[in-house]
Image: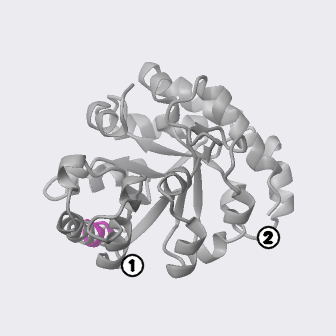
Amino acid sequence: MIDRRTFLATSGSAALASAALAPLACRRAGRSDPLDHPGVQLYTVRDAMAESAEETLDRVAAIGYREVEFAGYFERSPEQIRGALRASGLAAPASHVPSEALGEGWDAVIEAAITMGHRYLVVAWIPPVQRSTIDDYKQFAELFNQAGEQSRSAGLTFAYHNHDFEFAAIDGELPYDVLVAETDPALVKLELDLFWIAKGGGDALVYFTKHPGRFPLVHVKDMAADGEMADVGAGEIDFAEIFAQRSVAGIAHAFVEHDNPADPFASIRASLQYLERLEV
């Protein structure tokens, strides 16, 4: 089972079914809402993307998604992927990038993002060997600030995506709290993974209240009673309660994800159908 870090490191450089989303548009007419343009993190369908990125994007659009978030370009150039996005009618406001790209490699990341039309660049993972102490997290916070400044100068926004390990205390401190405190809110935003924060024992609503407007991106993924990942709506996370606070949090984009679904396309379809029914 491939992990996200390995996937990011090795992945290489249909018109929308808008009628299915009409109830959402009607319910929230007159205002921009992340639930009006739901997205999917393409890590969920990575095997299909590796076989044919073009066909996969068409299938994602046909299910009813309007946005995607990348995690690697599947051995295609940014220009090729941008063309496939146009053909499918999808937008790609964000992309995950490996932490190894921080520093000297960040200019190349920015160049590709501009070609792709991304607005957000998201570091998705800190390798275990680089996060054993609180000082390690402080050093990453400094790197995030630097990447955030470079990104802002290019018209982009930098963000960090959590897992559960940031909510395990080290010497009495939560690494996530250290990252939030040590980074400049004007330079570093946060993509909150709603499964992983719950798995780690954190509370999304508490962070929304403490750091309003700092969460323009969320990963929408559910947790079953046994703590395992589930399709959105099939678990125990209260998404209505979370999305009721979307204005406070600053959520602009919501990406469905399931790391290892039995049937990726059935999973993203079921998750979208749940979001379509969500009354918030």
In magenta stretch: residue 69: no
Picture disc at residue 4: none
* Magenta residues, dominant SS class: helix
How far apart marks 2 and 1 lie (CA) works out to: 29 Å
Picture disc at residue 30: 2
The answer, for residue 131, to whether it is visible in the render is: yes
List x then y, in percent, for residue 41.
51, 43
Q: Is residue 215 left or right of residue 63?
A: left
Query: Are there few (<14), some (14-19), or many (20+) residues within 10 Å of tag 1?
Result: some
Residue 7 quadrant: top left
In magenta stretch: residue 150: yes
Residue type at the position of mark 2: Gly
Taking the spot 86% from the left edge, 52% from the top edge, the residue there is 23
Q: Secondary structure at mark 1?
A: loop
Looking at the rendering, the stretch of residues picked out in magenta corresponds to: 147-151
Q: Secondary structure at mark 2?
A: loop
**Residue at the disc numbered 1:** 185
Residue type at the position of mark 1: Pro
Residue 80 quadrant: top left
Q: Is residue 265 left or right of residue 101?
A: right
